[in-house]
Image (tube, rainbow, N blue to C red):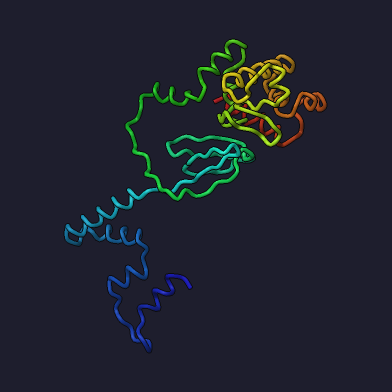
Amino acid sequence: MSNAHRGHKGYEGHRGKTRQPTVRSFVSRRLSFVSFVTFVSLVASAVPARVVSFVTFVSLVASAAPARAEIVFFNTGRTLSVKAHRSEGESLVLILRTGGEIVCEPSVVARITPDEVPYPEPVVEPAERPEAALEAVETVPYGEIIDKLSAEHRVDARLVRALIQVESAYHERARSPKGAMGLMQLMPATARQYAVADPYDPASNIEGGIRHLKSLLERWFTPALALAAYNAGEAAVEKFHGIPPYPETQNYVSRILRLAAR
């Protein structure tokens, strides 16, 4: 039975005798808490100032109420508290509590549960100057290492950043079910090929990944084919004479190119 129907019956006494509803019954039976505040606000001009002050107080309390969050449990054993999450195609988007988003593969996440500890909404700061905002957007983990090694090996740093974002979401201890390791998800054979002693060391992993990516770019000439080979293997690109018709690989290539173009 709906709330409206229950409220209508409450206005009728026994044997059909009608009685006038009181303000208390009207509020308790017909309005939710938020609706009550809205209702009082609408008639505030007709009531004493103390009532208006009460409405202001209630509004302030409601706006200061803490929001709920979620805890993301990664397969690596690490956790991250986020504001929320959503799915975009085959990708998982984590909305950070401090602003911004992280795009990652669902396979790197073990589970997501509600965070029992509420958190306050961030305080709105004065707008930054455009240059500062641009610097904040361009700031990424291991940015200096990526820029330095990309320049040394003449690989587009934007492509490397996007690849790391999709491969591991910048988790240096990430490990896939197939055994790929670290920021750029190097397979054991690839790590050995480029003499990466510790695949979980950020600098070593990034250098090995950049060298591997460069070799693929030199062989396939285009970023799209190089990325397809990075994901599905060179044999698959050779077999299909282009990007393999695997949904995972096609989505992988398009996501990285889209991120690199930002």
* Closest to the observer, 180 or 132: 180
Say above or below: 74 vs 116.
Answer: above
Residue name at image x 56 percent, y 35 percent: 103
Q: Would residue 22 appear left or right of 67 to someone viewing this image? A: left
Q: Quadrant of residue 165?
A: top right
Residue at point 34% right, 30% down?
Answer: 127
Residue 132 in the image: state x and y as whole percent: 39, 23
Identify which residue, 253 or 98, lies in the foreground: 98
Looking at this view, name the residue that lies furthest to the bottom. 15
Image side of residue 90 versus residue 118, left or right:
right
Residue 233 position by quadrant: top right
Looking at the image, residue 49 sits to the left or right of residue 62; the answer is left
Q: Quadrant of residue 89?
A: top right
**Viewer-proximal residue, 80 or 61?**
80
The residue depicted at 53 percent of the width and 17 percent of the height is 145
Residue at 33% across / 33% down in the picture? Answer: 125
174 sits to left or right of 27: right
In the current view of this chain or complex, which residue is farthest to the right? 239
Classify the position of the C terminus by image quarter. Answer: top right
Tell me where residue 59 appears, x and y as whole percent: 29, 53
Image coordinates for residue 35, horizontal then vertical, percent: 35, 60
Image spot of residue 87 (x, y percent): 58, 43
Seen in the picture, residue 27 relative to 262 is either above or below; the reply is: below
Depth check: 175 or 255 in front?
Answer: 175
Residue furthest to the front in view is: 197
On screen, 60 above or below 143? below
